[in-house]
Image (cartoon, grey):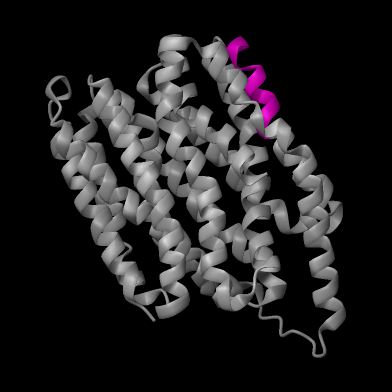
Amino acid sequence: MTALAFGGHAILFPTVPLWVVENGASTVGAGAVNAVLMLFTVLTQLAMPTALRRLGWPPTLVLGVLLLGVPSMLQLLAQDLGTALALAALRGIGFGIITVCGATAVAELADPARRGAAIGAYGFAIAAPQFVLTPAAPWAAQNLGYGLVFLAGACPILAVVPALRLGRAVHAAIDKRVATSTTPAARPALRETLRRLLAPMLILLGVTAAGGALLTFTPQMTTSVTAALLGLLALTGIAAISRWWFGILADRHGTRPYRAPLIALTLAGLLLAAWAVTTPTSTRALALIIGLALIGIAYGGLQNLTLIDSFAAVGPRHYSTASTTWNIGFDAGTGLGAITTGYLAAQHGFPLALLALAAIALATVPLALRR
């Protein structure tokens, strides 16, 4: 289910901005597509703890995969920016459902002693489709046609049956945990719970702002199709491996030794990428690819470490809140990166936009140094 749901998302995330530009939108409009997607994702995530209590797991998961897949089949009809933004909003609702449910399901079903590895495997199921589809989708759209790509983007519809099965499994696990609990779980105040979750959320926001910007705009930063393709392959492929590997390392050594160094890699990658695209018509291709590879290490690793920190900060009764807060950090960062880069690039060019993202990441270093 995870691979199909996130596969559809990975196909459309870089492709729809290209589609709206080809239909007359500006770079600001292109950035707005993924910003709206992330806005509705975050709004949905805020409602997820309540939705899961009232609707239950199986119907909520099915609704999520349908809202991710069906809008893709309508994308060719979105000849104007307004329609594209409306479809992005629907996909955002579906994405908000799947992201919160997926991470919460891992926490509910995995052995706590191996939670890092489990989160890593879950992350790999997300990142592996991105590795192939995020760089391939823009190429396929421009060479094979948008119709084929948008049809492939509807693949989350195929996840309806797996979504039902996963929903039932998680529901059973929650019932078992509640039935076998011998002591009432302490319930810290909501403010205290959110305070504990703030640091990992902000660290995640810093790196996903960089990732969201590059996943959205790398094809537009350079006239070299090859450099853009190889750069995105480096980012997404290394992120997939990094997310899995840092989960294993965190089970052995904890998360603290790795947080600040990964932020440093984010900064180095952004600075290198900014230098590489100083002159878009003569991109320093190797520097761009290396920069995106460095960001890929941080992008994957920090996703895992911050999710581990989020679950560790709260008890089982607050897993859905932890997942919601973490996903808000992820998606708010992605949307912030897309809209900030789109605006600054239109006014001042991509290098300055990437430097602004580096400043955002730098501001999270003090949080990473905390215990």
67 with respect to 54 (left or right): left
Q: Main secondary structure of the magenta part?
A: helix
4, above or below 60, in the image: above
Q: Quadrant of residue 350?
A: top left
- Closer-to-camera residue (275/36): 275
253, above or below 19, in the image: below
Residue bounds of the magenta highlight: 68-78
Q: Residue at x 53, y 73 (%)?
A: 195
Query: In which quadrant is the N terminus drawn?
Result: top right
Q: Residue at x 56, y 24 (%)?
A: 85
Does the image show residue 60? yes
Is residue 119 one of those drawn in magenta? no
Name the spot of residue 63 as percent of width and height, x first: 77, 39
- Closer-to-camera residue (63/82): 63
Name the spot of residue 103 as percent of width and height, x first: 62, 58
How many dots with numbers? 0
- Closer-to-camera residue (43/73): 73
Name the spot of residue 252 as percent of width and height, x first: 43, 78
Q: Residue at x 49, y 22 (%)?
A: 16
63 with respect to 328 (left or right): right
Query: In which quadrant is the C terminus drawn?
Result: bottom left
- Closer-to-camera residue (309/229): 229
Name the spot of residue 318 as percent of width and height, x first: 68, 71
Q: Residue at x 66, y 19 (%)?
A: 73
213, above or below 178, in the image: above
